[in-house]
Image (spheres, rainbow, N blue to C red):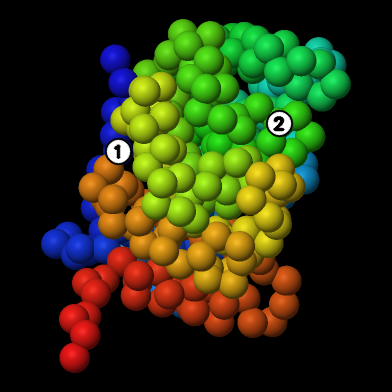
């Protein structure tokens, strides 16, 4: 049975997908919805703790209450928590896999406490081992983990293929899901930059069509629950993960128009993970979101 598609109730009746960005939780998780409102986001993604730590400080009742109050006040829904980058379920080191499972359990618990429906995870890397070994270890870890809390779905994110990371191709994702027993609470998040960097030519009409055909053939298309919309600073097929601002990288605007308007995706939440490295981060998010909304809107007829 396929994972349940969580319905995101944002601006009923609008033609655009719910759009937003990854925002900071500096000062506590309750600050995130307000940051989303500042940039005009419909939805946001967050880290629920410092992304460079295995375990986070326990969420207090005041944290949870404040988060829910701010969500209600702003109308900005947090659709995803991105798991810490340290988690590597494909590691050849048993100690790393064990710590990764504990960290994943912590992330899932936080998502449940905050009523966040999606938990986004980079599947992991096989390191110096063949990809088959990495896939087997990740699948075994997911089987060991068992079911996620009610209302929480794990989203495996496709990768650029950097450092033997698993999830570079739709075939890898399908094999991983099958090896894990196709759990009903595990689905997929697609990242536009990672697709391009991994060798899917989403910049061209033919390449986009080929990707969709492969996703249908591998039965991955019905599992997509969310998009990360990022341009790429690196070349097609580079297998180097470097995000960039929409329309300023190597992918091109037409690719994002195709994603935003495709019938399979136009109701899915889509968030930016574009660079944040200065005082103009909010301004850049606002600009990137405006670009996406312009692409998703109806084209004007030439005068």
Q: How many marks?
A: 2
- Image point (37%, 23%), residue name: 217
40 shown above or below 47: below
Q: Is residue 51 left or right of residue 13?
A: right
Q: Does the rendering let one see residue 302?
A: yes
- Secondary structure beneath label 2: loop
Q: Quadrant of the N terminus?
A: top left
Q: Which mark is residue 6?
A: 1
Label 1 crowd bin: few (<14), some (14–19), many (20+), radius 10 Å: some
In the picture of the structure, the residue carrying the numbered disc 2 is: 165
- Image point (62%, 58%), residue name: 232
Tell me which corner region of the image, top left, top right, bottom left or bottom right, holds residue 95: top right
**What is the residue that sits farthest to the bottom in this orientation?**
303
Residue sitting nearer the eye, 50 or 125: 125
76 shown above or below 198: below
Residue sitting nearer the eye, 203 or 66: 203
- Image point (47%, 39%), residue name: 189
Q: Does the rendering let one see residue 27?
A: no
Residue 10 image offset from top left, x and y in percent: 26, 58
Residue sitting nearer the eye, 100 or 155: 155
- Image point (64%, 82%), residue name: 280
Q: Is residue 242 left or right of residue 186?
A: right
9 shown above or below 279: above
Residue 291 image offset from top left, x and y in percent: 43, 75
Residue 254 image offset from top left, x and y in percent: 41, 64
Q: Quadrant of the C terminus?
A: bottom left
Distance from the alpha carbon under mark 1 to that under mark 2: 27 Å
């Amino acid at each position: 049975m396929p994972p349940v598609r969580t319905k995101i109730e944002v601006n009923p009746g609008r033609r655009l997908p719910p759009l937003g960005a990854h925002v900071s939780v500096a000062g506590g998780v309750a600050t995130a919805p307000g940051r989303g409102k500042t940039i005009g986001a419909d939805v946001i993604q967050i880290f629920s703790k410092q992304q460079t730590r295995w375990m986070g400080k326990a969420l207090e009742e005041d944290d949870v209450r404040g988060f829910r109050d701010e969500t209600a006040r702003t109308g900005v829904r947090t659709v995803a928590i991105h798991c810490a980058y340290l988690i590597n379920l494909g590691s050849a080191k048993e100690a790393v896999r064990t710590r990764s499972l504990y960290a994943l359990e912590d992330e899932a618990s936080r998502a449940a406490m905050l009523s966040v429906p999606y938990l986004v995870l980079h599947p992991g890397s096989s390191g110096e081992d063949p990809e088959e070994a990495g896939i087997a270890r990740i699948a075994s870890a997911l089987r060991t983990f068992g079911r996620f809390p009610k209302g929480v779905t794990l989203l495996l994110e496709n990768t650029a293929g950097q450092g033997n990371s698993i999830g570079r191709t739709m075939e890898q994702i399908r094999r991983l899901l099958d090896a894990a027993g196709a759990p009903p609470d595990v689905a997929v998040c697609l990242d536009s930059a990672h697709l391009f960097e991994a060798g899917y030519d989403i910049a061209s009409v033919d390449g986009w069509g080929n990707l969709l055909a492969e996703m249908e053939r591998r039965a991955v298309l019905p599992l997509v629950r969310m998009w990360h919309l990022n341009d790429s600073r690196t070349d097609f097929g580079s297998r180097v993960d470097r995000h960039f601002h929409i329309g300023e990288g190597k992918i091109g605007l037409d690719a994002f128009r195709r994603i935003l308007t495709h019938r399979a995706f136009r109701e899915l939440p889509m968030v930016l993970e574009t660079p944040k490295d200065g005082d103009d981060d909010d301004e850049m998010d606002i600009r990137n979101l405006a670009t996406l909304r312009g692409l998703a809107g109806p084209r004007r007829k030439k005068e």
